[in-house]
Image (spheres, rainbow, N blue to C red):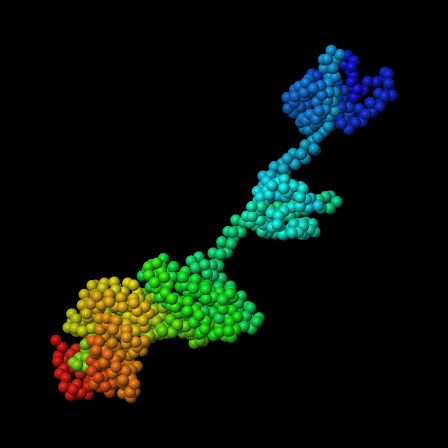
Amino acid sequence: MAADTSCGFPGSASWPEGGEGASEDAHYRSIFENAVEGIYQTTVDGRYLRVNPALARMYGFDDPSQLIASFTDIAGQLYVNPARRDDFARVMARDGVVTDFQAQVYRRDRTTIWIEESARCVRSRQGHILYYEGMVTDITVRMASEEKIRLLATVFESVSEGILVVDRNLKVCAANQAYLNITGHQRESILGRPPLLSTPGFDESGLIERICADADITGHWRGELNCVRPDYVPFSAWISVTTVRAPSGDTEFFVLACSDITERKQQEERIRYQANFDGLTNLPNRRMLHERLEQAIRLAASANERVAVAFLDLNRFKQVNDSLGHRAGDELLKQVARRLRSTCGASDTIGRYGGDEFVMIVPNIGERFSASYLAEKLLYAFSDPFPLPERELYCSPSIGIAFYPTDADNADGLIRCADLAMYHTKRSAPQRFSLYMPEMRLQSVQRLDLEHDIRHAILRQEFHLHYQPKFDFETGRIAGAEALIRWPHPTIGQIPPTDFIPVAEDTGQISHIGEWTLRQACQQAQLWRHNGIDLDVMAVNLSPRQFHDSGLVRLVRQILDETGMPPDRLELELTEGAMMVDMGRAVETLRRLKGLGVRLAIDDFGTGYSSLAYLKRFPIDTLKIDRSFVRDIANNATDTAIIDTIIGLACSLGFSVVAEGVETAEQALILMERNCRYSQGYLFCKPVPPEVFAEHFRRCDHEPWSGLPGLRSVADASQKPAPRKP
Ligand code: C2E
Ligand code: CA
Ligand code: CA
């Protein structure tokens, strides 16, 4: 626009007409009239002198004259922020021009738009500003998109997800701070280069190319990658790649978003570990064992192979826990786990099934080795003592073994079979492992019911005691009694103790039953004593588990105190097996019991270890010859010889001898001849309720050998006087 240097103000809203250079003017006029930008001239004090139609339209007026007429104060009427006019004027006064001046202005209808103007001032010859003239563009749309871009840029930098923008030539164009934080890269080192997730050398070559190629086809890609930072710290990233396409459909950019999921993965890993491994021993837990076994079975099924499952249960683990404390118990379990793991082959699994139970899975066992080989291998792990902080300790397992497909075709079934076989091992004392046999299942069903019923029997006091007299061959009278438990089951009828005692042993219920029996027998003995039935001894059976209970000695003392029973009138009967488990400890317990003044008897002597050597070490008073020897003494020379030996030995060690299961006079005679002083058996009396026992006692006391005339004469004939008991 040409500078108008005349002194007068242009007086009309439109282009000045006429004058020299009219055709040139027409050109300028056309530009002015048809320009897409708004063009204006204003007075310094804020009135429009001339505007073109474009500006009028921009500001919402029908024509320039309307616009000029309605503005008397540009600052106040046009600018949303009137101070902008001052800014404008200040720059103008200083520089003479204003360029790219942006402001928000009102249109005629009070809506606002953003404009950008460039203007200059026209001065008089004296240098006074005469008017401004300038050009205005509507930048509302541009401002909006710029604002959007600013917003997006802020988002881009502030999100916690790492974002990398890659162009279609696979060169990085942008990366946000989070991306740099996550990957450890420097912005300068990646911009304009092919993208990297890991540090060079660790990046799987072509990985990102492949990912982008995938994304190009489908529009996106998602996945997890393991990456390494430049400082060699590994991390796991969750990556999602999205393509940005031009309107033509061509891919322009790939936007790669990545988040660091290392912590989440570690947490997942921890959870997975906790769900599948035992925290104490770090062995697979029950769940994992199950899974591995199922897998082994699947493989074996397709390859026509066998899988062995060994179930191990530590013997006497409860005692370790009870006597040495849980910390020692835990330590023992850890050591056992370590040893078992070292016996494992690469394809075997050893896991902790629960408590003190371990399971070993041997897949593809083939004909490689037999069950006994497997058992020996496992047992070997227990051959050395386990060094616990408190002391060294021998520990042995009971093992049960079952095979796929012979015994069961699924994991549950197989473990159950092995477990049943293990129980079988536990119950057949010296045996160390058993192979599963189908009969065991039947036993177990009955066992389950028993377990439940025993609990009820304890609560409902269904147990009671019978007493079997101990007969004295020297006096023909009753010298003592053995208390034997009876359980008249409400629906089944009498259940023999040999059926339920082992179950009560396994389940721990024996401690309740045992305590009750002991107290009951002592109370009965005392009651009798007050009624003139003064027994030399009341014998009570102790099961192996009771014997190993660390509270036994305390319990016996307590019951003696409670009932007032003289200790030397109580005899505790124990089997050899119970004492053999840990001989050192057994001797210790026997000594402590002995210290209370009670008598000790070995029950069923001859059936167990029959190791005469240990007899000397044990502070015992009585040997009870098992009835299996008594049964055949009349016609089996070996049994007679054994009885001779036992009696001879007992005499030399100062033990008294009781023969069990004497049913016939013939047996009684043979025993008498051999100087066996005491015996029990149906010949004299079956185990009977207390009233019947009392009656029987009085009868024999009154008339020795009552009902046994044959024996009486033999006794008399052997010249031995039979004095009345004092
Ligand atoms: P045990 O201690 O050897 O008891 C002797 C068993 O032989 C008793 O069987 C008794 O009834 C039986 N008996 C006695 N005389 C004869 C005879 O002349 N011929 C035959 N054939 N048998 C005879 P019972 O009462 O069935 O007890 C079996 C086993 O159960 C006992 O063997 C003992 O080990 C256990 N038991 C019984 N009561 C208790 C108890 O209160 N506590 C514990 N822990 N075990 C008990
Ligand atoms: Ca007994
Ligand atoms: Ca016995």
Quarter of the rendering containing residue 298: bottom right
502 vs 82, nearest the viewer: 502
Q: Identify whether 68 is placed above or below 141.
A: above
Judge from the rendering whether residue 106 lies leftward or rightward of residue 365; answer left or right.
right
Question: Which one is in front, 334 or 154?
Answer: 334
**Quadrant of the snapshot with the N terminus:** top right
User: Is 367 situated above or below 220?
Assistant: below
Residue that appears at 33% across and 66% down? 509
Toward the front, the furthest residue is: 201
Return the residue found at the far top: 126
- Location of residue 83 in the rendering, given as x and y in whole percent from the top left corner: 64, 21
Q: Residue at x 73, y 46 (%)?
A: 250
Depicted 62 relative to depicted 424: above or below = above
Give left or right: position of 137 versus 693: right
Residue depicted at 39% across the width and 68% down the height: 383
The percent position of residue 334, horizontal first and vertical second, equals: 41, 60
Q: Nearer the viewer, residue 723 or 391?
A: 391
- Above/below status of 713 relative to 318: below
Q: Position of residue 177 (x, y in %)?
A: 59, 40
| Quarter of the C terminus within the rendering | bottom left
> Would residue 638 be visible to someone looking at this image?
yes
Residue drawn at the location 46% of the way across and 66% of the way down: 343
Q: Give how far across and how far down residue 213 sits, in percent.
A: 69, 51
Count of numbered labels shown in the rendering? 0
Give the image quarter of residue 488: bottom left
Residue 88, quarter of the rendered image: top right
- Is residue 211 shown to the viewer in this render? no
